[in-house]
Amino acid sequence: MADALPSPPFIDIAGIHNFRGIGGEHAGPGLVYRSADPSKATRTGLQKMSQDLGIRTVFDLRSAPEIRREVKEWANVAVDDPEVFKEYGITREWVPVFAEKDYGPEQVAIRYKEYTRSGSEGFVKAYHDILISGAKSYSKIFRYMAQDKPSPLLVHCTAGKDRTGVFIALLFMLTGASDDEIAREYSLTDLGLKELKPVFIERILQNPAVGANRAGVENMVSSKKENMLATLQMIRKDFGSAEAYMKKYCGLSDTEIDKVRRNVTEGALVSMGKV
C-alpha cells in the first residue's frame, strides 16, 4: 500500500491495493467496500477487515483463469471456495462476471482491443459487455444487499476498476447520485492503483493480444472520469436506468430494489447526522 493515500475514502488494509468504502451524499460508508485482489492481505489486514470494518462477505468477480494465474496462495484450493478468509469470520462468494469459457485468448484479445482504443468508445463497449455478462453475478450481490440489515461486504475483481467499477456505478445511480459524483468516485482508482500500474502495464504488454501498444495499455489501466460519464450515458440509452437493469437483467423485484436503495441511502443519512 502507498504510505499516504487520500482518506477518506481510502482505507489502509495491509496487502490490499485500492481499498476504499463508498460514501457521499447518497451512499453512506460502512456497508459497501471495493478493492483490488485481496488474496495477499496480511493477517493484520484481514483482522482489520473483520474486526474494525465488520466485513462478513467478500464477492469475487474474477474468472477462474485469472485466479489460477494470479493467486499462488490459492493454488491448491478450489477457486469457488478458498479458505483464506474463513478463520476471520469472512465468507467468500465467487461470482465471476466472465465464465471460464468466455475468458479464452480470443475473448481476452477482443476486450484488450476495446480498452486500448483512444477515447471513451472502447471502454463503453467493454463496460456494456460487462453489464450483459455480469448480470447474474451482480444480482447475487444486490440480493445480499436487499436483506434486512445486511452485514458489510467487499466487492473486488483483479484491479477493482472495471467489473467492480461498473457495479459501484449502478449502485450510485440507484441512489440518485449525480453523474459527476459517480465519475469522480470511479476516477479515484487512478490513485488507488498508483503503485500497481507499472506492474500491470509491463504484464499486459507481454500478452500477444496487445502487442507493443504501450499508449493503449496505459489508457487501459486508467480510470478517467470521461470514460464513466460516457458509460452512464450508455446505461441510460441501452438499459434505461439502474432500476430497469436490475429488474430486467438481474431479475430483482421492485421490493428488492427498494431495499437495496434504502440500505445504502440510510447509511448516508446516518453518516451526515440526519437520522
Image (spheres, rainbow, N blue to C red):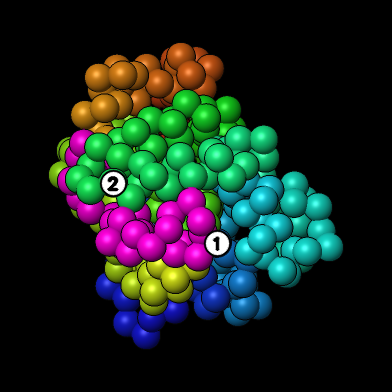
Query: Residue under circle 1?
Result: 37
Q: What range is drawn magenta here?
A: 204-230
Q: Label 2's element?
A: loop
Residue holding disc 2: 117
Which residue appears at 44% of the width and 31% of the height?
129
What residue sits 55% from the left and 40% below the top? 106
- Relative image position of residue 38 (x, y in whole percent): 57, 64
Residue type, mark 1 in image: Asp
How crowded pointer 1 is (Cα within 10 Å; few <14, some 14-19, many 20+) is rated as many
**Disc 1 to disc 2, C-alpha distance:** 25 Å
Above or below, comparing residue 2 to residue 271 in the picture: below
Q: Is residue 68 left or right of residue 32?
A: right
Q: Is residue 95 depicted above or below 90 in this figure?
A: above
Image quadrant where one finds the C terminus: top left
* Type of amino acid at the residue the image marks with label 2: Arg
Tell me where residue 70 appears, x and y as whole percent.
63, 63
Quarter-of-image position of residue 258: top left
Query: Foreground: 219 or 153?
Result: 219
* Residue lying at 81% horizontally and 52% vertically, measured from the top left: 78
Side of 73 where 42 appears, left or right: left
Image location (x, y in percent) of residue 44: 60, 79
- Note whether residue 31 is visible: no
